[in-house]
Amino acid sequence: MHDDLIAPFDFAILKSPEEMDQEKAGLLKDLKPFFRFDREFTKTQREELINYFDTKWKTKYVGNDKLENKRARNLHAVLSIFDSVMNTGVIENHSTIEGKSKNFEINIVNDNVLRVEPLGDLFTIQQADKYIRKVLPAYENIDEPLMLNVLEHVLSQNVKYDAATSEKEKLGIISKVSPSRGLVQTNERIISRGELVSAEKFQVLESLRIDYENRLGSSFKLTGIVIGQIILLAISMAALFLFLMFFRAELFGETRQIVFLLLLIQTMVIITSLVVRFNPQYVYLIPVCLIPIIVSVFNDSRLALFSHLITIIITGFLVPNSYEYVFLQLFAGIVTILSTVRLERRSQFFFTSLVIFLTYSLIYTGMTLIKEGSLEDLNYTNYLLFAGSAFLTMFSYPLIFIFEKIFGMITNVTLLELSNTNNKLLRELALKAPGTFQHSMQMANLAEEAIHEIGGNPLLVRTGAWYHDIGKIDDPLYFVENQSTGVNPHDDLTYEESAEIIVDHVLRGVEKAKKYNLPEQIIDFIRTHHGTRKAEYFYKMAQKDNPDEEVDIDTYSYPGPAPFSKETAVLMMADTVEAASRSLKKPDEEAIDKLVESVINNQIASHQFDNADVTLRDIRKIKSVFKKKLMNIYHLRIEYPK
């Protein structure tokens, strides 16, 4: 599809790796390996033979000095056979001669003298042993078993493979192979538009690429290329930061979130760079769709799409066929985000992987049809790469868990696990503080409905509602919702002691949450559900009973902090409204309306929502939701006939 390619300078046509290997193999097939005759070792073994012979002879013929002549005759025989075998040479077993015929020639170096001998002229260790057994009977009046034992004890290989000399000779032969097989001159046409790229043409193009890169390596142009890459990378990163600044301002100020995004993008770029450098054909095996899955799980689909777009634009600079790569990855990422919009079950990861594979396959098939007009040139290996990439995206689940722990973030999958009422901590709450458990259920419904109305994370606020009062588990009877026997332990305490117990349930809840490794986002609901308000009942009673004394307000105040998000603000409202509604003697529409207005207006007046991202319009909607829900909870039934 490109214009005619004209040679910009003279360059050599390099041989392909296959051609080089074939030519080297042709030259090396006649290479005679080098072996070295170890004369020093042979001398040592001969001395060992004499010593061993003396030991064995004295052991067998101890105290018999009349056999000296026989001893000399046996020693002469054994030395004669040893010299015959070892001077001929016992060759070491080595891969270079394995399976070779007797006529295969090798180089033998003996005292810096080189001679060429066929393998058949040397002994192997087995052949030497057979030779000894064959010639021993030819000697008369010798102790044949003793001589055989002595010879087999010292028999060893004294013609050993000379790796250094063999490798030097091999390198010398290889160095004679020319890496090129022709020359392309300046302004010569290399390939024309529309011309088929044959294997020979490809090698010419590859030679031009290598020569061009070598020239750049020692040229000022390399600096220009690096500057260009920096500019393009800077623009890509600037686009990401501008998106965060204008559309995700709450994330832009969080270093943790910025590091998280940059780490994901940088890791994918590094992986792509390494794959392209070492084996570009596996570029479609890279699980690029991990980025949109992980980002969408922790944030939202818009940020996931933008992060994915920045990633494939940057990696598109590195890969071959950039347009096809970007087109393919863009739509695969879009489909991935659509399939994980509401990620609430682990099984969705399998469905997403299947969707990714189908998207890759369909787009690749369509691209092939556009270019070729038929499916004859489909590369079926690509489908295996697509399947591998889709499979690797399933590792997003363990990666999400790891990122949750490293960056202290939370996902809907974790929230679903925490909101399961069979959870150990929730079971303990239900058993020890059943009234508090029921209160948590009711306020969870209120808070979830309200956050749906104003926009936020319903699952987060619901889970926070389940755990907000776990500090009451240890002393449940001090809280009115758990007092079913009519006995109130506060009757035996001072107002200060009662207030201390009530206020401390927040701190005890935080401690218990940390003990059970609850995420910080859930612990925030425990810290903030009373904000910086007071234990009103005991505070007012203390003022009433001690009108002439100044009551220490700090004793009756919750430690805070005040709510700082939509979710924590809604939970505080739901908590107070639900608890207060239980005291209504006649829960009709008018009473509920007054209750909701009074409770939430008091919270506003005490500046509990100053740090939360809620508007007066949001609060008006929240009030409306609470009123409707409470009317449904306390609706009056008709009286059935007796």
Image (cartoon, helix red, strand yellow):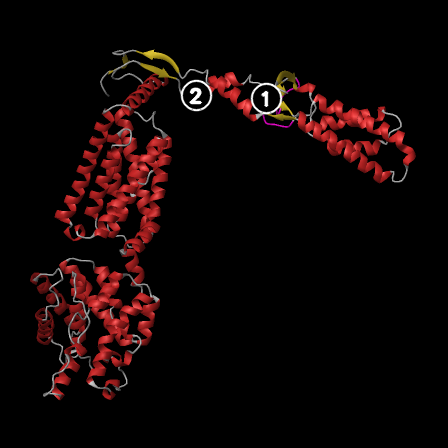
Q: Which residue is pictured at 17% across the width and 58% down the height? A: 456
Q: Quadrant of residue 528?
A: bottom left
Whether 99 is among the magenta residues is yes
The amino acid pointed to by label 1 is Phe
Return the residue at label 2: 18
Residue nearest the viewer, comparing 614 with 517: 517
Magenta residues?
Answer: 92-102
Find out whether residue 57 is within the magenta segment.
Answer: no
- Dot 1 lies on which element? strand
How far from the left and from the top, in percent, is residue 9? 27, 14
- Mark 2: secondary structure: helix
Would residue 149 be visible to someone looking at this image? no
| Residue at x 25% of width, y 71% of height | 507
Is 53 on the left or on the right of 69, as rendered? left
Mark 1 lies on residue = 34
The answer to whether one can see residue 203 in this image is yes
Closest to the observer, 43 or 568: 43
Of the two numbered discs 1 and 2 in the rendering, the one whose residue sits closer to the viewer = 1
Q: Amino acid at mark 2?
A: Glu
